[in-house]
Each structure stands twice: as C-alpha cells, then as structure tokens.
Amino acid sequence: MGKEPTLGNGKICYLEMPTADIARSSAFYQKVFGWKVRKRGDGKLAFDDGVGEVSGTWVTGRKPMTEVGLLIYIMVDDAAAMIESVTANGGRIVQPIGEDHPEITERFTDPAGNILGIYQQPTKYYLELNKAKGIMNYVDGYVLPVPKKNLSAYRRIAEKAGKVWRDHGALEYRECVGEDLNVKWGVPFPKTLKVKAGETIVFSYIVFKSRSHRDSVNAKVMKDKRLAEMMDDSAMAFDCKRMVYGGFKVLVDA
C-alpha cells in the first residue's frame, strides 16, 4: 500500500468476501471502486480499499451475502455515477438513491451476489438544497431532441455545463434521457417535438432559490468563458433551435 494504515484497538481491519470467481470479483471492485488488488505472501489475491485503510480478500466455498443483515457501505464521490459503473461491470442496483433520504445511499449486488451499500458524503450544494426545502424554489426546464448517436457527446457537454451552473450557485442540475416515451396517455414527447428517426428526448432542469437567484446565476453563466467553449461542441451534438425552455415557480415540493 502507498501508506501505512491507521492501527488501533477496535478498528475494523479485514474483510473476507464470498465469491465463486475470485478473478471476476477482484476485477469488479478494482474497476468500480478503485481498490488496489495485490498478492499476499501465500500467493492469494487481497485488496486494499480506496484510501488504504481497510484490507481484505475473496474466499470461495462460502455463501454470498444475498440478504441484508450486516451491511457494509463503501464511500464514493458520486453515488449517482456509480449506477452505470456497477451495472457495466457485472453488478446490479437493488435499492436506488433516495430510500434512506436525507442520506445519499444506494445498495447493489456484486458479481458474486453479495449485497453492499454505497454512501456519498453530502456536499455543500446538497446541504444547501435540503436547507432550501420549504422555500418557494424556482426551476428552469428544458426539453430537446438529441440524436442517439450523439448522446455520449451530449453527456460530456452536460457534465461541463452542470459544473458551470453549480459553480455560480445553482442548487441542482439534472439531465435526464428518455426511457419510456411512447406512452398511450396524453401527448407523447416525441410527437410534441416532432422527433426524427434515430433521436431521443432529453429532459433537463436546474433548481434555484428564487426567480431573482435564477436571473443572477444565469447572468454569471452567460459571461463564463467555459460556456462559449461548450457552444461549439453543442452545435454538433444537438439543434438548439428545437429546444423547448421555460422558467417555473415551484407549486408543490413534497
């Protein structure tokens, strides 16, 4: 390990994780959580967690932890981003973010079937957002068609845009891609926006403290040089002229 772990009476120091495939499990935790995998003196694989404080190994011949009893949580920087990483590497989300509100947690099964938790330390903006509950917040909403082939490029642009808005004081920034759009009730988004073949819908919203706060934040964003740099990229990812946009006063905050 890069540094010596903290030693002391009562510390949780070692974990033995059941698996039927050590190579697969070790690759999962290495890719998803950045654990350092190494060989012990006896030649067996072991791991050190992301900060080098807790070590462990994978063991065969034991049943996986498929039911929630003793639950181990792994700390991450961005719980939402872990959803894609967990599923892409053979895991599955079994409890989404929000069930333990106001804590930012989710639960997943690893490739071996063990259930573990993910925990994100609340950031400054999250605390501000929860503090603002009860205040009549203001929301900017956007709906736009995006070619499916451009979604990766759009996501990169949106991640940069989210940082710009958040840096200037927006409480929350969300970009959501259509998943269930061909509904029978009401008027479907694709029909409203005259979606072309190969396109999908992106629904986005930004949360502010008030209308005046929105105006102040957006004025700063418009002067930010990073926004101008993104506009060149956005021209290739989607058509701004087809975007539907508006500002909304929150009516209900349940």
Image (spheres, rainbow, N blue to C red):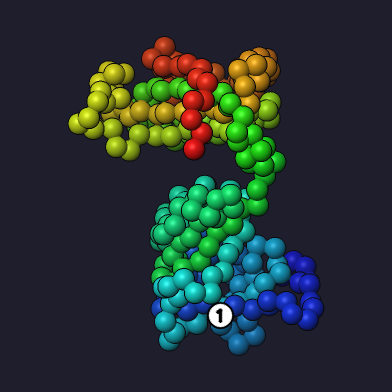
Q: Residue at x 76, y 72 (%)?
A: 5
Compared with residue 126, is residue 192 higher up or lower down, i.e. above or below?
above
Position of the N terminus by quadrant: bottom right
Compared with residue 241, is residue 42 higher up or lower down, i.e. above or below?
below
Q: Residue at x 35, y 34 (%)?
A: 178
Compared with residue 216, is residue 154 higher up or lower down, i.e. above or below?
below
Q: Position of residue 198 (x, y in %)?
A: 28, 28
Q: Which residue is mark 1?
A: 16
Where residue 215 sits, quadrant-wise, is: top right
Residue 196 falls left or right of residue 247: left
> Is disc 1 surrounded by few (<14), some (14 to 19) or many (20+) residues within 10 Å?
few
Q: Position of residue 163 (x, y in %)?
A: 62, 32
Q: Position of residue 130 (x, y in %)?
A: 62, 40
User: 251 or 189: which is nearer to us?
Assistant: 251
Q: Residue at x 42, y 54 (%)?
A: 88
Q: Residue at x 58, y 26 (%)?
A: 136
Q: Position of residue 91 (x, y in %)?
A: 42, 61
Element under label 1? strand
Residue 130 falls left or right of residue 233: right
Where residue 9 sits, quadrant-wise, is: bottom right
Residue located farthest toward the top when viewing the structure as drawn: 241
**Three-letter amino acid code at disc 1?**
Glu
Residue located farthest toward the left when viewing the structure as drawn: 184
Compared with residue 241, is residue 6 higher up or lower down, i.e. above or below?
below
User: 217 or 196: which is nearer to us?
Assistant: 217
Can residue 79 be seen in this snapshot? Answer: no
